[in-house]
Image: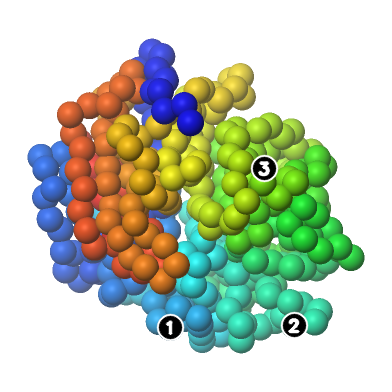
């Protein structure tokens, strides 16, 4: 695998809204890993954190708590990334969220007017279910007062067969998208899986029936996650792993510039492996485009999608020997430096360590790097850049 580091050119500043977790809401437990990097625990013993930062700088955070086979999703927010509001339960039915597998957890997006949108794969007892007891792709949004979530809904109308979870995206125009992969109705098998997107034009009040996003028969890795994201201009991106001819489990990027009516698709990174790696991926806003990160063959990479051209830069790999690296995210500082964070040694029902590396403005590894134990089982790591400089890593 090519592990060379590509230059971003021009020192482009990547301002990324990263998946994140934070310290306890009332008393964050922070530890300085270095002068630039601080570590924080997920509040209230939670796992699988996801966060987004809105235009006002407010951090919106969700996390999972409870029994992994059937627990709850909680939401908190913070104006400073340290002190948080009291948690609100997102799921209206207790125990209707799942943590097993790590990649099936809830995703978060912030849309028009700062409204929070959450989507997740339902647990075994989650309602409402699909035909033949099919797992639901559930959605809930924060109400207008910001003090509770609307009742959860299943957005799947025809493309049942959910396995690897799904994702949610929202833009400033009131569009909300829930995406997942599932077999073509009436068929089975990974090779017959497609990416499906259900769109709301009214901030999540109603959703249209899902539409197939990819027309090429790439398949989709059944027990791998996926990620969707809408940028500042309203362009919708979907990042997923294929399952073509069983062994071709490549990364693919879908792009729509017309609110999900049509998508273009391209292969991002090849990987031939005859097994499901249960991998996650991430998309977020950058100053000059959108940043994507993913796993290939035990190594983690990230790449910039240029906003003006739509082209992807050459993938940037985490330096060193790749040994079970997964679940990568990135965060970028005001000087153009980029922090990449990932897990090591995590797996099925097994926690592990986290590691990080700072890249300079040209995309080359800087001196700042580190590693720490303590990632819980079924969980992830995350990071965000602090306004005054440096980063916070969350686990």
Task: Say left or right for 250 vs 51.
Answer: right
Q: Residue at x 59, y 22 (%)?
A: 311
Return the disc, 3 or 2, that comes first in the chain's sequence: 2
Q: Residues within 10 Å of mark 3 (few under 14, many from 20)?
A: many
Task: Please tell me whether mark 3 or mark 1 is closer to you in this view.
Answer: 3
Front one among 294 and 144: 294
Q: Which comes sooner in the sequence, label 3 or label 1?
A: 1
Residue occupied by mark 3: 248
Residue farthest along the front direction in this orientation: 274
In the rendered image, which quarter is residue 262 located in?
top right
Circle 2: is it few (<14), some (14-19), or many (20+) Cα within 10 Å?
A: few
In the displayed structure, 22 sits above or below 361; it is: below
* Dot 1 or dot 2, earlier in sequence: 1
Residue 264 image position (x, y, % from top left)? 74, 33
Q: In the image, is residue 326 above or below residue 204?
A: above
Whether pointer 3 and pointer 2 mark residues with C-beta atoms closer than 8 Å, the reply is no
Residue under label 1, please give it.
67
Residue 221 visible? The answer is: yes
């Amino acid at each position: 695998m090519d592990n060379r580091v590509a230059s971003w050119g021009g020192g482009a500043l990547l301002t990324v809204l990263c998946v994140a977790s934070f310290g306890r809401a009332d008393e964050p437990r922070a530890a300085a890993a270095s002068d630039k990097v601080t570590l924080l625990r997920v509040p209230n013993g939670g796992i699988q954190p996801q966060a987004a930062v809105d235009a006002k700088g407010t951090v919106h955070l969700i996390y999972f708590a409870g029994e992994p086979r059937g627990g709850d999703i909680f939401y908190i927010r913070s104006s400073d990334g340290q002190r948080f509001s009291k948690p609100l339960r997102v799921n209206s039915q207790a125990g209707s969220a799942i943590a097993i597998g790590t990649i099936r957890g809830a995703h978060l997006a912030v849309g028009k007017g700062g409204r929070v949108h959450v989507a997740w794969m339902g647990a075994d007892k989650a309602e409402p279910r699909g035909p033949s007891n099919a797992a639901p792709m559930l959605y809930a949004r924060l109400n207008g007062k910001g003090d509770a979530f609307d009742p959860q809904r299943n957005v799947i109308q025809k493309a049942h067969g959910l396995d690897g979870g799904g994702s949610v995206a929202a833009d400033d125009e009131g569009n909300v998208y829930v995406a997942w992969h599932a077999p073509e109705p009436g068929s089975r098998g990974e090779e017959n899986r497609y990416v499906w997107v259900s769109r709301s034009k009214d901030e999540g009040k109603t959703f249209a029936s899902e539409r197939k996003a990819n027309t090429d028969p790439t398949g989709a890795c059944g027990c791998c996650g996926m990620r969707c994201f809408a940028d500042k201009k309203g362009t919708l991106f979907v990042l997923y792993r294929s399952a073509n001819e069983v062994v071709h489990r490549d990364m693919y990027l879908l792009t729509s510039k017309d609110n999900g009516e049509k998508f273009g698709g391209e292969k991002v990174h090849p990987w031939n492996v005859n097994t499901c790696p249960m991998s996650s991926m991430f998309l977020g806003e950058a100053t000059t485009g959108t940043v994507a990160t993913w796993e290939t063959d035990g190594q983690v990479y990230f790449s910039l999608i240029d906003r003006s051209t739509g082209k992807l830069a050459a993938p940037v790999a985490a330096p060193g020997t790749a040994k079970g690296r997964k679940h990568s995210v990135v965060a970028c500082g005001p000087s153009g430096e980029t922090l990449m964070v990932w897990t090591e040694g995590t797996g099925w029902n097994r926690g592990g360590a986290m590691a990080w590396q700072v890249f300079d403005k040209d995309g080359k590894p800087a001196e700042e790097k580190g590693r720490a134990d303590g990632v819980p089982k079924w969980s992830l790591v995350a990071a965000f850049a602090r306004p005054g400089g440096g980063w916070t890593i969350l686990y």
